[in-house]
Amino acid sequence: MLHALAWNLLCGLPMQLTRLWSLALLTSTLTFACGDDPGVADADSSSGTDGTDETDGTDGGAGLCDDDPAELVRPSGWGRESHCKGATPDYDRLFDDTKVQRLDLTIAATDYADMRSDLVEAAASNNWDVDPIYVPADLKYDGKTWWQIGVRYKGNSSLHSAVNQGIDKLSLRFKFDEYEQANPDLLDQRFYGFKKMTFSNGFKDASLIRDKLGGDIFRAAGVPVARSAFVRIYVDVGDGPTYWGLYTMIEDPSNKMLDSQFADAGGNLYKPDGEGARLQSFDEASMIKKSNEELGDYTDVQALISALNAGSGEQWRAELEAVFDVEGFLLLLAANQSIVNWDSYGWMTHNYYLYADPSDGLFKWIPWDLNESLLIQGGGGPGPGGGGPGAGSDSVLLEEISAQWPMIRQLLDDEVYSATYRQNLLDLQTGAFDLETTTALAQRYHDLIAPYVVGADGEQPGYTFLSSDAAFESSISGGNNAIADHIATRHADVSAATN
């Protein structure tokens, strides 16, 4: 009560008197800015990342979030910046490249049993196209708690492969307001500004850094891409915390990424998946909307596909450039082939987003799912450019890609766009894919995560894809598909192809 009175007086005084009042209040714990509600400001703790539960000075109560109904009482520990919708996404905190943070989940034994039963049912029917079920869980991070968040498994080939191998390190998706209807006090719960978050398990990646490193290279090149960071996840399903392993936490492109990387976040976001993702012709079922889902309007992406397949030459270029960021795609494609990201357009009918940016009316291409980047071949597939990860995925000039993939074939058959693509390849050699810089970054990430991958605090049997500690230790240099060796080889490949 005293703090509230002081706050009202202080913020209503002239500046000279405000300074005097500020000095008088230094001995109290009052630390807020005018315009904030005393007692509800979120004094973030700096407890570290050990998952220990330390108070942040936030007591919960009414009126914590903007537009909260008067009768809504938030739980003790709810923070304005950490839990409220509308808080500025804290990228610096969550996506810190210098540390491996810790997340602790608690899932009720019965809910976990349901989660596993759903997975067993999918395995028995071999139906991996249906999303796994959400179950409620409590999350602890950096001394704070998030209650009844939705947690589910995610993935397709990575998911059923892990299940078949008996590995419980499965990719995850969190939705922080999934259970708000059953818990009105958790209305619009957010995780430092984020509604959703995904967690990649490092499937097919002995280094466990490809998702992050690949994204960092695209980002350095100027390509819009999701931010990511390393986290270790512990899960308690009734028997105490179990280390599920080292994950890459990745922001969901349908969430705050559009706000942070585009001038206007109100456009349609599509996640193409299926035959229509080749972009030869429009297929509504393949154009999965991730924003504005309630609007059944696909005219924008129909216009893109129509313009792409309309022919060639100067008029064709002008019409395509009126609806698509061709320059951005040619840069992305050059980065994609410099590093080799075979699990992408040109080989697979998924793993990208299309965003219709209202600020300039152009579609932007966003790469996704980079755990098999910086990697030669995925194995299998029907052959060069034919729809699977067969021979040719490490091509530089993509001459083998067929007309089944018009966004590559149409553009690179055009002499203007082909010249731009080749120049991008050369520029990346001394830019975002610089040999020395990229190799050093890979080594830094390797050293950063090593204590949580191998050794006493490393991944445990049943919760790792590693065949041995040596597989991780040689993943940068000397091992099968070692990243530093791969980077050097790709520099030589690009140089040879463009000379």
Image (cartoon, helix red, strand yellow):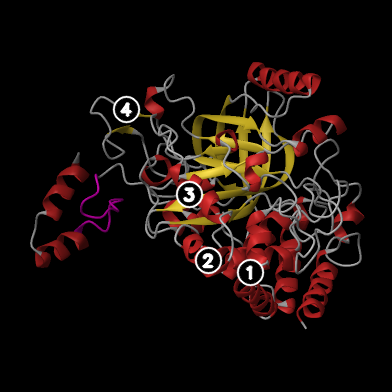
In the picture of the structure, the residue carrying the numbered disc 3 is 303
Number of the front mark, 3 or 4: 3
Tell me whether circle 4 and circle 1 mark residues in contact (CB < 8 Å). no
Determine if the magenta segment contains residue 35: yes
Task: Please tell me the numbered disc located at residue 317.
Answer: 2
- Mark closest to the chain's N terminus, 1 or 3: 3
Task: Please tell me the numbered disc located at residue 73.
Answer: 4
Q: What element does badge 2 sit on?
A: helix
Count of numbered labels shown in the rendering: 4
Compare residues 11 and 189 and report the one nearer the observer: 189
Q: Main secondary structure of the magenta part?
A: loop
What crowding class fits label 1: few (fewer than 14 Cα within 10 Å), some (14-19), or many (20 or more)?
Answer: some
Cα separation between marks 1 and 3: 20 Å
In the picture of the structure, the residue carrying the numbered disc 1 is 414
Cα separation between marks 2 and 1: 9 Å
What crowding class fits label 2: few (fewer than 14 Cα within 10 Å), some (14-19), or many (20 or more)?
Answer: some
Tell me whether circle 2 and circle 1 mark residues in contact (CB < 8 Å). yes
- Mark closest to the chain's N terminus, 4 or 1: 4
Q: Is residue 147 above or below residue 171?
A: above
Cα separation between marks 3 and 4: 48 Å
Q: In the rendering, at what x and y percent does residue 256 appear?
A: 46, 49
Q: What element does badge 3 sit on?
A: helix
